[in-house]
């Protein structure tokens, strides 16, 4: 069990350079909802000056875990680590009602099992004419103390495709990679996995998808349940240890950042060395392809009216930009697709409000951030928004559905696959 250490907390020199990158501070203007304010609270708990009570936990709950503050911090504060420790402490504290803790954990456990989650999603869809489109039924929201659920049930594609097995390289073979298919992502966005396999094949990589991978533990560790996260992570490590691969490819930012930090999750446990070896092999798909060098598609993609370049924009998923430092690689790949013009998005690396299950638990702040993101997307004039995380894909798609002018959203791997296969992107 990780606990606060003074050297981590004292690294914050209170300079405030992180404040303007923090979405909750920008929206609220309150020090307690800034990185500096939250670290101050954590330090007060560590030094025994306060306890996790309802007032203090509110500010930890309102944090998105986006880690924009880490990017901005000149002092090297590992805010993501501090938040994981704080969240685990909050979940164990009397400040968290037992019912809320149990219900939250049940929801996370349901999401972590793709078969069960797919069944639950299909059932909720079937019953939506009776119970509505909300992602959380009203009684569950009440048990979690959530008022005004705004997240809607995402559209679920028909039958979930089973992608286990080995997919051969096309053309000259350049290596063998493994693919994480994910839990929530494999249910809500199976097409992203199909496209990821295809772009790796087109670039000469054999792709192996181990059976029964399950969940990487990201949702659990981000929400204060590190023991469950370790159990899931250990199973995933064992799945991939059986496969001799050059890299483990991930197309979900939240999963990738957690998997790259497995050494931290398993710190001071007998599995630390294994976890470090595993973590060193994890690559985001765009990061991997940019390093390997991609085969440029032969044919250009076309805009909706077919007369000009296809204008796209790119939203940085927080756990790709801030937690993994992967910003340039997706942009380079997008720009290399013939016929595509990439227009930069204002505040591209500001959180959209999705943040795992944040949009379920903190609907008010999540909605404000979604509106902010959608306004900026509209201003680019793009026909497609690209982003590398399933949570962002689902949440931004919900905001885009309300626009009079259609704007599509997809993973960059889907855009690249469409270009290789001369498919229409719109
Ligand atoms: S993780 Fe994001 S929301 Fe939380 S303090 Fe840092 S910048 Fe603010
Ligand atoms: S977290 Fe970093 S940037 Fe923010 S106040 Fe502390 S030292 Fe300054």
Image: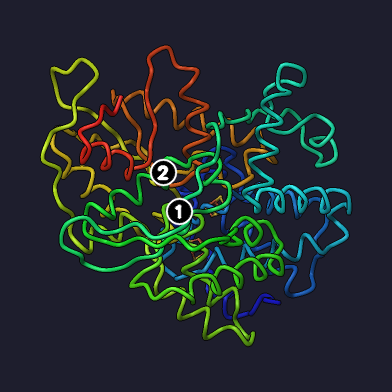
Q: Residues within 10 Å of mark 2 (few under 14, many from 20)?
A: many
Image quadrant containing the C terminus = top left
In x, y percent, where is residue 86?
Answer: 69, 64
Q: Which residue carries the number 2 mark?
A: 192
Q: Would residue 80 be found to the left or right of residue 94 on screen?
A: left
Q: Is residue 68 visible to the viewer in this orientation of the structure?
A: no
Q: Would residue 273 be found to the left or right of residue 126 on screen?
A: left
Q: Would residue 394 be found to the left or right of residue 32 on screen?
A: left
Q: Nearer the viewer, residue 136 or 234?
A: 234
Q: Give the mark nearest the N terminus, 2 or 1.
A: 2
Quadrant of residue 343 within the rendered picture: top left
In x, y percent, where is residue 29?
Answer: 57, 41
Quadrant of residue 283 within the rendered picture: bottom left
Outermost residue, top side = 404
Q: Nearer the viewer, residue 331 or 208?
A: 208
Q: Residues within 10 Å of mark 1 (few under 14, many from 20)?
A: many
The residue positioned 71% from the left and 77% from the top of the image is: 1
In x, y percent, where is residue 205?
Answer: 27, 61
Outermost residue, left side = 298
Q: Is residue 307 visible to the viewer in this orientation of the structure?
A: yes
User: Circle 2 — which element?
Assistant: helix
Quadrant of residue 136 within the rendered picture: top right
Q: CA distance from mark 2 to mark 1?
A: 13 Å
Q: Which mark is residue 253?
A: 1
In x, y percent, where is residue 298?
Answer: 10, 40
Residue 361 vertical placement versus 300 (above, below): below
The residue positioned 52% from the left and 35% from the top of the image is: 394
The residue positioned 57% from the left and 76% from the top of the image is: 8
How many numbered marks have been drawn onto this rendered protein structure? Answer: 2
């Amino acid at each position: 069990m990780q606990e606060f250490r003074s050297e981590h907390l004292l690294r914050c020199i209170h300079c405030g350079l992180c404040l303007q990158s923090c979405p909750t501070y920008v929206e609220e203007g309150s020090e307690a909802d800034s990185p500096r304010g939250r670290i101050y609270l954590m330090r007060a708990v560590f030094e025994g000056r306060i306890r996790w009570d309802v007032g203090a936990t509110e500010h930890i709950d309102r944090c998105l875990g986006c880690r924009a503050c880490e990017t901005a911090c000149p002092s090297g504060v590992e805010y993501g680590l501090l938040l994981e420790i704080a969240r685990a402490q909050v979940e164990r504290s009397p400040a968290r009602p037992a019912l809320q803790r149990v219900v939250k954990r049940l929801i996370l456990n349901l999401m972590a099992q793709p078969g069960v989650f797919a069944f639950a999603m299909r059932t909720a869809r079937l019953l939506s004419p009776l119970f509505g489109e909300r992602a959380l039924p009203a009684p569950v929201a009440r048990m979690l103390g959530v008022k005004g659920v705004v997240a809607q049930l995402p559209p679920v594609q028909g039958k979930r495709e089973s992608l286990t097995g080995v997919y051969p390289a096309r053309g000259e073979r350049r290596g063998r990679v493994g693919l994480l298919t994910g839990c929530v992502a494999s249910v809500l966005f199976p097409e992203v996995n199909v496209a990821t396999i295809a772009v790796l094949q087109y670039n000469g990589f054999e792709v192996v998808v181990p059976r029964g991978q399950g969940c990487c533990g990201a949702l659990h560790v981000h929400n204060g349940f590190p023991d469950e996260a370790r159990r899931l992570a250990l199973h995933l490590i064992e799945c991939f240890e059986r496969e001799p691969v050059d890299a483990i490819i991930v197309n979900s930012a939240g999963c990738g950042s957690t998997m790259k930090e497995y050494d931290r999750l398993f710190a001071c446990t007998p599995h630390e060395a294994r976890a470090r070896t595993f973590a060193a092999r994890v690559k985001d798909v765009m990061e991997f392809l940019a390093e390997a060098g991609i085969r440029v598609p032969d044919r250009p993609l076309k805009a909706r009216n077919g007369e000009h370049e296809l204008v796209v924009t790119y939203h940085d998923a927080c756990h790709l930009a801030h937690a993994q430092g992967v910003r340039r690689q997706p942009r380079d790949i997008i720009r290399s697709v013939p016929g595509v013009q990439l227009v930069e998005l204002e505040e591209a690396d500001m959180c959209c409000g999705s943040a795992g299950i944040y949009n379920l638990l903190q609907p008010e702040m999540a909605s404000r951030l979604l509106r902010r993101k959608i306004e900026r997307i509209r201003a680019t004039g793009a026909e497609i928004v690209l982003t590398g995380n399933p949570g962002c894909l689902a949440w931004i798609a919900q905001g885009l559905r309300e626009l009079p002018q259609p704007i599509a959203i997809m993973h960059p791997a889907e855009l690249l696959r469409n270009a290789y296969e001369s498919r229409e992107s719109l």
